Image (cartoon, rainbow, N blue to C red):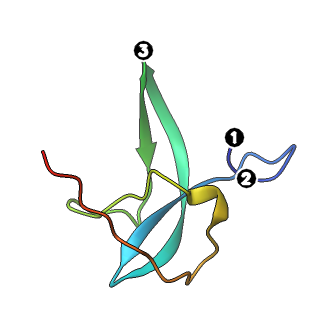
């Protein structure tokens, strides 16, 4: 899981001009495998980091790998 043990804080990382930016989020509705993530700091089009986020801290330089569709 994300966050500290015993803490309700959850967070995600987004791509902020090539650096990781940590965003605190609230977990909303769950639909099977899909979880709604709610944050005032997230906006449409933000690039969420979904691989390797366990090694990130705020400000880490990112190595962006674009997978071909």
What's the residue at 69%, 52% (across, down)?
Answer: 9
Residue 40: x, y in percent?
A: 41, 63
Say whether marks 3 and 2 touch (CB < 8 Å).
no
Q: Quadrant of the N terminus?
A: top right
Residue 52: x, y in percent?
A: 55, 57
- Spatial CA span between label 3 and label 2: 22 Å
- Spatial CA span between label 1 and label 2: 7 Å
Of residue 57 and residue 35, the one placed in the foreground of this image is 57
Q: Residues within 10 Å of mark 2 (few under 14, many from 20)?
A: few
Number of residue marks: 3
Local SS, label 1: loop
Q: Quadrant of the C terminus?
A: top left
What's the residue at 55%, 84% (across, down)?
Answer: 59
Residue 4: x, y in percent?
A: 81, 53
Mark before the other along the chain sequence, 3 or 2: 2
Q: Quadrant of residue 14?
A: bottom left
Local SS, label 2: loop
Q: Which residue is mark 2?
A: 3
Say whether marks 3 and 1 touch (CB < 8 Å).
no
Q: Residue furthest top?
A: 32
Of residue 24 and residue 49, the one placed in the foreground of this image is 49
Residue 65: x, y in percent?
A: 31, 64
Q: Which residue is mark 1?
A: 1
Mark before the other along the chain sequence, 3 or 1: 1
Say whether marks 1 and 2 touch (CB < 8 Å).
yes
Q: Which residue is mark 3?
A: 32
What's the residue at 46%, 23% (across, down)?
Answer: 30
- Spatial CA span between label 3 and label 1: 17 Å
Identify whether 60 is placed above or below 10: below
Q: Residue furthest right?
A: 6
Of residue 39 and residue 60, the one placed in the foreground of this image is 60
Identify whether 63 is placed above or below 49: below
């Amino acid at each position: 899981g994300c966050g500290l043990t015993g803490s309700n804080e959850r967070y995600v990382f987004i791509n902020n001009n090539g650096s990781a930016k940590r965003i605190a989020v609230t977990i909303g509705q769950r639909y099977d495998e899909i979880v709604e993530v709610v944050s005032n700091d997230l906006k449409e089009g933000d690039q969420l980091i979904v691989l390797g986020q366990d090694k990130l801290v705020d400000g880490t330089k990112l190595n962006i790998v674009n997978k071909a569709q």
